[in-house]
Image (tube, grey):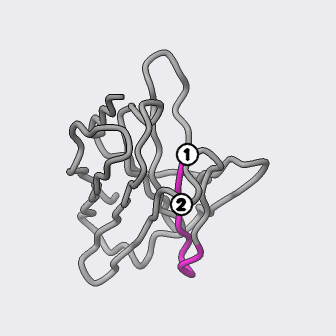
Amino acid sequence: QVQLGESGGGSAQAGGSLRLSCVASGDTASNYCMGWFRQAPGKEREGIAVVDIDGNTYYADSVKGRFAISKENANNTLSLQMNSLKPEDTATYYCAATGPFGGSWSSNGHVGCNNIDAWGPGTLVTVSS
């Protein structure tokens, strides 16, 4: 089972940028779906950006046009570039991956991965106004 570890969280001012990285212990080329999820205090975990095995990317409406997900199979790394940050982006961000029986989905402004096999421990992002 692949192991994941996030880095790059921290504090930013509204309108600023942060870049998150997730390094996988295994070969990311075999992950049918990888993505970034976040959980704000008192709220459920939500998918915000996912990429499938063909490189197709999907974004939640809440981050579309501001965040960009990218996967580098050569380095087994998944990244999330976050621009134009808002206070409502404050949350713990998690990297996740599926195995060969997973897949991506996008519906009604929401996104995610099916049959997630692994989660990272999370990294905290705090955006102040």
Q: Residue at x 79, y 48 (%)?
A: 108
Quadrant of the image for the N terminus? Answer: bottom left
What's drawn in magenta, residue-wise?
47-56
Please check the rendered image and state whether residue 81 is part of the magenta-colored stretch, yes or no.
no
In the depicted structure, whether residue 56 falls above or below residue 127: below
Is 3 on the left or on the right of 97, as rendered? left
Q: Tell me the number on the disc at residue 90.
A: none
Answer with the quarter of the image where residue 78 lies. Answer: bottom left
* Residue 75 at x, y percent in the picture: 24, 78
Q: Dot 1 surroundings within 10 Å: few (below 14), some, or many (20 or more)?
A: many
Please check the rendered image and state whether residue 51 is part of the magenta-colored stretch, yes or no.
yes
Q: Do tag 2 and tag 1 residues touch (Cβ < 8 Å)? A: yes
Q: Nearer the viewer, residue 12 or 45?
A: 12
In the depicted structure, whether residue 102 falls above or below residue 18: below
Q: Nearer the viewer, residue 126 or 114?
A: 126
Which amino acid type is shown beneath numbered disc 2?
A: Val
* Residue 113 at x, y percent in the picture: 58, 54
Identify the residue position indicated by label 1 in the image: 47
Which amino acid type is shown beneath numbered disc 1?
A: Gly
Identify the residue position indicated by label 2 in the image: 50
